[in-house]
Image (cartoon, grey):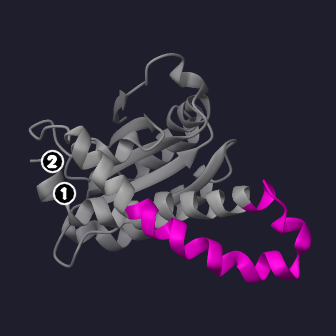
Amino acid sequence: MGTEHISRAEGNASSASSVTLAIKHRVRTEAIARYEQWLRVIAARAAQYPGHQGVHIIRPPEGGNEYSIMIRFACFADAERWTTSTDRQNLLAEIADAFEQEDQFHIQPGIEFWFTPPSPAQKRPEPWKQWLITTSVIWPLTMLIPPLLKPLFTAIPLLGHWGISHGIIAGTIVALVVFLIMPRYVHAVSRWLFR
């Protein structure tokens, strides 16, 4: 069950360092409460699979019914292991009657997912828009995160060493961008971004 689209970057995308499994569900209004319970179950099951790096759920606004779920995996092989698993197929079968349309998902390397049009009718954002969005997210974080982490580096000098501190800062920024900021930001500017 489910419609799959896999977008591979140039070269050997199957070895990409991180990928996003993007899932969209349109849920019948009367089944939303049941779907929410099911969503907790399937998210927990996915977290047990190798390479799982976290999940982010964007719930619809009041009165809406479209959910977006982003699951990060270490590589394409890990994402595909989950999407083709018996566990996922069985769980989807349990909730299939709650969907307005068939389960749809995409596997995208790196940050490409954020700039994939929500529907085929929309065009892919121009490169300058992608650059502007990404820069406007990362720029303030590069100014805010280092000072915020400075007390940690002072308290634990080992973490403040050159290279180690850079890795901690970079990891913190990437986590904030991927799991917290970008999903909401792109959703907020989607009308401008995809026109």
Q: Which residue is drawn at 15% across and 48% down?
A: 194
Kind of residue at badge 1: Ser
Q: In this view, does 112 lie to the left or right of 186?
A: right
Tell me the residue that label 1 is attached to. Answer: 190
The answer to whether residue 57 of the structure is visible from this angle is no
* Farthest top residue in view: 11
From what the image shows, is residue 31 above or below residue 75?
below
From what the image shows, is residue 16 above or below residue 36?
above
Q: In this view, does 190 lie to the left or right of 97?
A: left
* Label annotation for residue 154: none
Q: Residue at x 85, y 62 (%)?
A: 161
From what the image shows, is residue 62 above or below residue 114?
below
* Label annotation for residue 194: 2
Quick check: marks 2 and 1 in contact, CB under 8 Å?
A: yes
**Residue neighbourhood size for the residue with mark 1, other residues' Cα within 10 Å, grouped as few (<14), some (14–19), many (≥20):** some
Which type of secondary structure does the marked residue at label 1 adopt? helix
The answer to whether residue 193 of the structure is visible from this angle is yes
Which segment is the magenta one?
A: 137-165
